[in-house]
Image: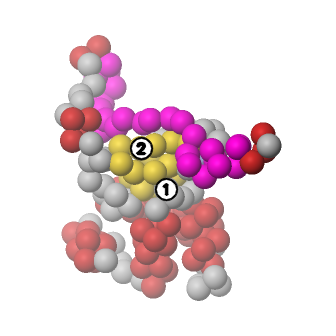
Amino acid sequence: MDLFYQTCREHGLKITPQREQIYKEICRSAKHPTADQVYRAVKRRISSITLDTVSRTLHLFVKAGLVISVESYGTARRYDPNVQPHHHLHCTECGGIMDFEYRPFDRITAPAQVAGDFEVSRTRVVVSGICANCKKKQKRKVR
Ligand SMILES: [Zn+2]
Ligand SMILES: [Zn+2]
Protein backbone atom coordinates (compact mmCIF):
# COMPACT_ATOMS: atom_id res chain seq x y z
CA MET A 1 0.00 0.00 0.00
CA ASP A 2 3.01 2.30 0.31
CA LEU A 3 3.02 2.80 -3.44
CA PHE A 4 -0.65 3.73 -3.27
CA TYR A 5 -0.20 6.43 -0.63
CA GLN A 6 2.94 7.76 -2.24
CA THR A 7 1.40 7.94 -5.72
CA CYS A 8 -1.77 9.57 -4.40
CA ARG A 9 0.29 12.19 -2.65
CA GLU A 10 2.38 12.85 -5.75
CA HIS A 11 -0.68 13.27 -7.95
CA GLY A 12 -2.76 15.18 -5.44
CA LEU A 13 -5.34 12.40 -5.21
CA LYS A 14 -7.34 12.55 -2.02
CA ILE A 15 -7.03 9.32 -0.06
CA THR A 16 -10.50 8.04 0.81
CA PRO A 17 -11.63 4.69 2.24
CA GLN A 18 -13.34 3.97 -1.08
CA ARG A 19 -10.17 4.55 -3.07
CA GLU A 20 -8.17 2.43 -0.63
CA GLN A 21 -10.63 -0.42 -1.00
CA ILE A 22 -10.70 -0.16 -4.78
CA TYR A 23 -6.93 -0.29 -5.00
CA LYS A 24 -6.70 -3.15 -2.50
CA GLU A 25 -9.25 -5.10 -4.46
CA ILE A 26 -7.34 -4.82 -7.74
CA CYS A 27 -4.15 -5.94 -6.02
CA ARG A 28 -5.89 -8.80 -4.27
CA SER A 29 -7.64 -10.09 -7.36
CA ALA A 30 -4.59 -11.03 -9.51
CA LYS A 31 -7.02 -11.61 -12.36
CA HIS A 32 -6.87 -8.22 -14.05
CA PRO A 33 -10.44 -7.42 -13.06
CA THR A 34 -12.95 -5.23 -14.85
CA ALA A 35 -14.49 -2.19 -13.16
CA ASP A 36 -17.63 -4.23 -12.61
CA GLN A 37 -15.75 -7.03 -10.83
CA VAL A 38 -13.98 -4.51 -8.61
CA TYR A 39 -17.29 -2.81 -7.92
CA ARG A 40 -19.02 -6.02 -6.87
CA ALA A 41 -16.19 -6.99 -4.52
CA VAL A 42 -15.87 -3.54 -2.92
CA LYS A 43 -19.64 -3.22 -2.51
CA ARG A 44 -19.54 -6.05 0.03
CA ARG A 45 -17.51 -3.78 2.31
CA ILE A 46 -18.80 -0.34 1.27
CA SER A 47 -22.45 -0.77 0.36
CA SER A 48 -22.91 2.87 -0.67
CA ILE A 49 -20.35 2.68 -3.50
CA THR A 50 -21.57 2.92 -7.11
CA LEU A 51 -20.18 1.44 -10.31
CA ASP A 52 -19.78 4.95 -11.61
CA THR A 53 -17.52 5.88 -8.69
CA VAL A 54 -15.44 2.76 -9.23
CA SER A 55 -15.08 3.46 -12.95
CA ARG A 56 -14.08 7.06 -12.39
CA THR A 57 -11.64 6.08 -9.65
CA LEU A 58 -10.00 3.48 -11.89
CA HIS A 59 -9.65 6.10 -14.59
CA LEU A 60 -7.90 8.38 -12.08
CA PHE A 61 -5.65 5.50 -11.01
CA VAL A 62 -4.64 4.92 -14.63
CA LYS A 63 -3.82 8.60 -15.10
CA ALA A 64 -1.71 8.58 -11.94
CA GLY A 65 0.14 5.47 -13.12
CA LEU A 66 -1.12 3.45 -10.20
CA VAL A 67 -2.71 0.78 -12.38
CA ILE A 68 -2.57 -0.01 -16.06
CA SER A 69 -5.52 -0.39 -18.36
CA VAL A 70 -4.72 -3.64 -20.19
CA GLU A 71 -5.96 -5.25 -23.35
CA SER A 72 -9.46 -6.55 -22.98
CA TYR A 73 -10.76 -9.16 -25.31
CA GLY A 74 -14.24 -8.21 -26.35
CA THR A 75 -15.81 -6.92 -23.19
CA ALA A 76 -15.00 -4.36 -20.55
CA ARG A 77 -11.72 -2.60 -19.91
CA ARG A 78 -9.52 -4.43 -17.44
CA TYR A 79 -7.04 -3.13 -14.90
CA ASP A 80 -3.63 -4.28 -13.79
CA PRO A 81 -1.96 -3.21 -10.52
CA ASN A 82 1.43 -4.45 -11.74
CA VAL A 83 3.04 -1.40 -13.37
CA GLN A 84 6.44 -3.09 -13.72
CA PRO A 85 7.41 -4.55 -17.11
CA HIS A 86 5.70 -7.90 -17.42
CA HIS A 87 3.81 -10.00 -19.92
CA HIS A 88 0.52 -11.79 -20.08
CA LEU A 89 -0.80 -15.25 -20.55
CA HIS A 90 -4.30 -14.97 -21.91
CA CYS A 91 -6.67 -17.90 -21.65
CA THR A 92 -9.01 -17.86 -24.63
CA GLU A 93 -11.50 -20.09 -22.79
CA CYS A 94 -12.17 -18.28 -19.51
CA GLY A 95 -10.64 -14.91 -20.47
CA GLY A 96 -8.17 -15.17 -17.62
CA ILE A 97 -5.06 -12.99 -17.77
CA MET A 98 -2.03 -14.10 -15.79
CA ASP A 99 1.25 -12.27 -15.36
CA PHE A 100 4.61 -13.67 -16.24
CA GLU A 101 8.08 -12.18 -16.33
CA TYR A 102 10.66 -12.80 -18.98
CA ARG A 103 13.51 -10.34 -19.29
CA PRO A 104 14.22 -10.80 -23.04
CA PHE A 105 10.61 -9.77 -23.80
CA ASP A 106 11.08 -6.54 -21.82
CA ARG A 107 13.51 -5.34 -24.46
CA ILE A 108 11.07 -5.65 -27.35
CA THR A 109 10.36 -2.33 -29.03
CA ALA A 110 7.74 -1.34 -31.58
CA PRO A 111 9.05 -1.19 -35.16
CA ALA A 112 9.55 2.27 -36.67
CA GLN A 113 6.71 1.94 -39.18
CA VAL A 114 4.32 1.36 -36.28
CA ALA A 115 5.73 3.95 -33.95
CA GLY A 116 5.40 6.83 -36.44
CA ASP A 117 1.94 8.28 -35.85
CA PHE A 118 1.16 5.93 -33.03
CA GLU A 119 2.56 7.08 -29.72
CA VAL A 120 3.87 3.93 -28.08
CA SER A 121 3.52 3.88 -24.29
CA ARG A 122 4.48 0.28 -23.66
CA THR A 123 5.02 -3.02 -25.39
CA ARG A 124 3.94 -6.31 -23.94
CA VAL A 125 3.95 -9.88 -25.11
CA VAL A 126 0.63 -11.67 -24.85
CA VAL A 127 0.74 -15.44 -25.04
CA SER A 128 -2.70 -16.85 -25.84
CA GLY A 129 -3.76 -20.36 -25.03
CA ILE A 130 -5.73 -22.46 -22.60
CA CYS A 131 -5.03 -22.32 -18.88
CA ALA A 132 -4.52 -25.37 -16.70
CA ASN A 133 -7.97 -25.05 -15.16
CA CYS A 134 -9.77 -24.89 -18.48
CA LYS A 135 -7.69 -27.77 -19.81
CA LYS A 136 -8.82 -29.90 -16.88
CA LYS A 137 -12.45 -28.98 -17.54
CA GLN A 138 -12.11 -29.81 -21.22
CA LYS A 139 -10.70 -33.23 -20.41
CA ARG A 140 -13.65 -33.93 -18.15
CA LYS A 141 -16.09 -32.96 -20.89
CA VAL A 142 -14.52 -35.31 -23.40
CA ARG A 143 -14.92 -38.30 -21.11
ZN1 LIG B 1 -8.94 -20.61 -18.63
ZN1 LIG C 1 -0.54 -8.02 -15.72
Cβ of mark 1 under 8 A from ligand 2 = yes
Percent of width and height locating residue 136: 65, 49
Q: How many marks?
A: 2
Mark 1 in CB contact with mark 2 (< 8 angstroms): yes
| Residue 111 to residue 74: above or below | above
| Residue 37 to residue 89: above or below | below
Q: Secondary structure at mark 1?
A: loop
- How busy is the neighbourhood of tag 1: few (under 14 within 10 Å), some, or many (20 plus)? many
Residue appearing at x 27%, y 42% in the figure:
102
Q: Report the quarter where the N terminus lies.
A: bottom left
Q: Secondary structure at mark 2?
A: strand
Res. 46 visible in picture: yes
Q: Which mark is residue 88?
A: 2
- Amino acid under disc 1: His
Q: Nearest the camera: 75 or 99?
A: 99
Percent of width and height locating residue 47: 65, 84
Range of magenta residues: 114-139
| Residue 138 to residue 113: above or below | below
Cβ of mark 2 under 8 A from ligand 2 = yes
- Residue 44 lies left or right of residue 88; in this view the side is right
Percent of width and height locating residue 90: 51, 42
Q: Report the quarter where the C terminus lies.
A: top right
Residue appearing at x 51%, y 58% in the figure:
31
Q: Is residue 124 magenta?
A: yes
The residue carrying mark 1 is 32
Residue appearing at x 60%, y 52% in the figure:
133
